[in-house]
Image: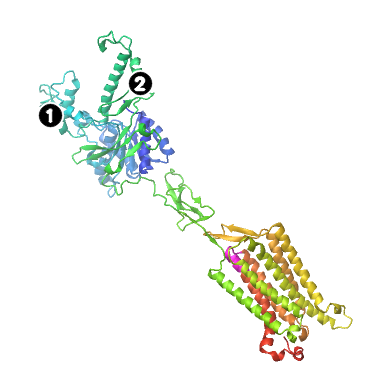
């Protein structure tokens, strides 16, 4: 007539799970039942992520234990209870378990600590979870010995599993009308009456001389809870249902029998026990309290348990308040909804600093950190370690951190992921505005120089060293400055295709023009010697061949690049943690560095030729300015490669733009600033007769 004990175990786990109590102590009886309890409960706790802080055994026979033996028991058990950080303790057994624990704590607090451990502070305030096997109603034996299991308020606020009971409207009235003097055929009532009221129905003799005679008018409601409870307890309710179940089974057996019509009364019906048992399995009825009573296939009551809260008083009495229900019939076992708790009705121990209290081996790992096992300790005990870079923990007590999606990044606390913002070198940001302004400034300067040279195209200094090459170089530099704008703004398919190839082609044309000008100087000087074979190359023919051949080779490399593995827009998720960098993927790194390598080769050749021609006569002295310009150009691009490789995102783009502007400005300034100085500020030197006497 009671639910299966395994349901109580499951309910206990659900209760711990409801309040988050993962660090619990366990006290059981030192017998076979206690061993079985541990064998069943501990694996369930471990499976659900709970740990037992300690396991203690309560002795079975309290009254017969000697004082010195009990003192020894207290000294052995005290460190387990007092030093444990578990705020929740499960007690399984009989009433002796409560008495043993109550006495142990009382002796420890009143005798052991003051006498043997002065200054030791006993941790106060625990939540006791008591199983239904412990009968709260103390029997006469404990009453005669004046043993009160709930003294000093130690177990105040305890949560207890109890066999389910419902309030019966006529039960209290039945108790009020109970008269032991009129009870016929009930030998139990008088014995009970004598025990609870310490009186006697028999004549006074030596064994009862200290008792007063029982009048039968004593009131049960005056008895304290440890002696008697006026409410229908789970045990009374089980007996009530058992009587009705038996009555229903007998009625079913009688009414379905083939001879029931010929039998005058049920008492003449003969039956075997197994016949009655089979009927009990099949019955199902609603009792007068409205509860459905039925049995499962194992012959067990398909019912649940009540969760009660124990409230104690200074006079060693107590009341039990229902605060919840464990009912597998409502939603089914293991549904997670079979346990219902009304936390507002629970009265906790007054010495608890937090309600509901925490019962964990150590503090929770807050979001942003994860649990890390402690060597040699149970898995409920752990250290908290911060999440690694790029990882987050968005909940408490996570076993491991998780990585954010590619388009998100961890916040500073590493407890949530934040969407990354697309990033590229735009025209609106300060760096983009600065580089755009520099580009337009140098473009305007180049256009101005080109305009000056066109306007003064008939002057000697413009005609010297091939005027068409000068125009071609200035136009190439103008385009070099403008191609920097292809690197600013959000990359798209068109800009990605042409910005590197246009930059490589135009720069190669500019360097080829510089090489052609230097070569022209050398050829012109060599041609002054009689019979020299270079005389036939004097003029524009050689310059055009050099410019065309050098430029076409770079165009061929760029065309091959576009055909085989062209650049394309791409997203860089990892270079900058907080942003998605919109980049142009170069497609083929080999082709990209081939373009740069070819430019470097042309610049090296041009620098070498110009260096060799720097000491030619003054008339052809443009070579030394070209030497300085190529020195600047090579220095810029030699610095570019390591800097470019060590940066990422928009910084990488800015480095390339700066290199383009710096190298182009170097060519423009070193080659054309001396000429512009003479043309604009010293026109008196821009004469044929001065050309041979002064250094340009």
Q: Position of residue 129 (x, y in %)?
A: 32, 38
- Of circles 2 and 1, the one toward us is 2
**Which quadrant holds the C terminus?**
bottom right
Q: Quadrant of residue 549?
A: bottom right
Q: Main secondary structure of the magenta part?
A: helix
Q: Residues within 10 Å of mark 2 (few under 14, many from 20)?
A: some
Dot 2 or dot 1: first in sequence order is 1
In the image, 181 versus 110, the foreground residue is 181
Magenta stretch, residue numbers: 646-656
Left or right relative to 468: residue 497: left
Q: Which mark is residue 282?
A: 2
Colour scheme of the picture: rainbow
Q: Is residue 654 magenta?
A: yes
Q: Position of residue 370 (x, y in %)?
A: 46, 50
Q: Which residue is mark 1?
A: 218
Q: Position of residue 347 (x, y in %)?
A: 26, 43
Q: Residues within 10 Å of mark 1 (few under 14, many from 20)?
A: some
Q: Is residue 105 magenta?
A: no
Residue at 73% in and 60% down: 560
In the image, 331 versus 225, the foreground residue is 331
Q: Quadrant of residue 624?
A: bottom right
In the image, 447 versus 283, the foreground residue is 447
Left or right relative to 228: residue 342: right
Q: Position of residue 327 (x, y in %)?
A: 34, 33
In the image, 258 versus 36, the foreground residue is 258
Give the structural element (helix, strand or loop) at label 1. Answer: loop
């Amino acid at each position: 007539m009671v639910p299966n004990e395994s349901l109580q175990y499951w309910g206990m786990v659900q209760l711990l799970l409801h309040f988050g109590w993962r660090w619990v102590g366990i006290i059981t009886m030192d017998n076979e039942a206690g061993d079985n309890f541990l064998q069943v409960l501990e694996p369930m706790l471990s499976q659900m992520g709970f740990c037992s802080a300690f396991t203690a055994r309560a002795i079975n026979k309290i009254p017969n234990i000697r004082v010195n033996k009990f003192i020894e028991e207290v000294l052995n058990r005290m460190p387990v209870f007092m030093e444990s950080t578990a705020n929740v303790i499960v007690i399984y057994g009989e009433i002796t378990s409560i008495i043993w624990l109550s006495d142990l704590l009382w002796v420890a607090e009143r005798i052991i600590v003051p006498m043997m451990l002065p200054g030791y502070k006993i941790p106060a305030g625990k939540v006791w979870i008591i199983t239904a096997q412990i009968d709260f109603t103390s029997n006469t034996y404990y009453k005669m010995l004046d043993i009160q299991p709930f003294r000093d308020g130690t177990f105040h606020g305890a949560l207890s599993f109890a066999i389910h009971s419902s309030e019966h409207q006529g039960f209290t009235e039945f108790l009020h009308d109970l008269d032991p003097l009129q009870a016929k055929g009930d030998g139990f009532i008088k014995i009970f009456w004598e025990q609870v009221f310490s009186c006697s129905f028999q004549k006074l003799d030596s064994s009862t001389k200290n008792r007063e005679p029982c009048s039968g008018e004593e009131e049960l409601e005056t008895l304290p809870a440890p002696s008697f409870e006026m409410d229908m307890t789970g045990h009374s309710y089980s007996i009530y249902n058992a009587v009705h179940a038996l009555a229903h089974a007998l009625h079913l057996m009688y009414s379905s029998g083939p001879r029931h019509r010929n039998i005058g009364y049920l008492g003449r019906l003969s039956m075997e026990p197994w016949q009655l048992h089979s009927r009990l399995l099949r019955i199902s009825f609603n009792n007068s309290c409205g509860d459905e009573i039925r049995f499962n296939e194992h012959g067990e009551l398909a019912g649940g348990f009540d969760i009660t809260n124990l409230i104690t008083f200074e006079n060693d009495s107590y009341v039990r308040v229902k605060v919840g229900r464990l009912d597998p019939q409502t939603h089914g076992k293991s549904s997670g909804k079979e346990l219902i708790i009304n936390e507002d009705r629970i009265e906790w121990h007054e010495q608890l600093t937090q309600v509901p209290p925490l019962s964990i081996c150590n503090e929770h790992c807050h979001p942003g950190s994860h649990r890390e096992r402690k060597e040699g300790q149970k898995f409920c005990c752990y250290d908290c370690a911060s999440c690694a870079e790029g990882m987050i923990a968005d909940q408490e007590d996570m076993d491991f951190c998780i990585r954010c999606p590619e388009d998100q990044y961890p916040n500073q606390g590493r407890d949530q992921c934040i969407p990354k913002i697309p990033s590229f070198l735009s025209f609106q940001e300060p760096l983009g505005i600065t580089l755009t302004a520099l580009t337009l400034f140098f473009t305007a300067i180049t256009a101005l120089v080109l305009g000056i040279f066109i306007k003064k195209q008939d002057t000697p200094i413009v005609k010297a060293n091939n005027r068409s090459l000068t125009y071609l170089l200035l136009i190439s530099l103008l385009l070099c400055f403008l191609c920097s704008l292809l690197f600013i703004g959000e990359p798209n398919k068109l800009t990605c295709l042409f910005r590197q190839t246009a930059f490589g082609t135009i720069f190669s044309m500019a360097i080829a023009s510089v090489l052609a000008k230097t070569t022209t100087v050398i050829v012109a000087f060599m041609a002054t010697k009689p019979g020299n074979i270079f005389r036939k190359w004097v003029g524009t023919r050689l310059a055009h061949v050099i410019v065309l051949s050098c430029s076409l080779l770079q165009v061929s490399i760029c065309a091959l690049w576009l055909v085989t593995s062209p650049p394309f827009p791409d997203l860089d998720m990892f270079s900058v943690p907080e942003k998605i960098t919109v980049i142009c993927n170069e497609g083929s790194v080999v082709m990209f560095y081939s373009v740069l390598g070819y430019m470097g080769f042309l610049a090296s050749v041009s620098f070498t030729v110009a260096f060799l021609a720097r000491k030619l006569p003054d008339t052809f002295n443009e070579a030394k300015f070209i030497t300085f310009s190529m020195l600047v150009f090579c220095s810029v691009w030699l610095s570019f490669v390591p800097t470019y490789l060590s940066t990422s995102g928009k910084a990488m783009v800015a480095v390339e733009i700066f290199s383009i502007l710096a190298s182009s400005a170097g060519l423009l300034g070193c080659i054309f600033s001396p000429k512009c100085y003479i043309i604009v500020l010293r026109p008196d030197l821009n004469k044929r007769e001065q050309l041979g006497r002064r250094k340009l």
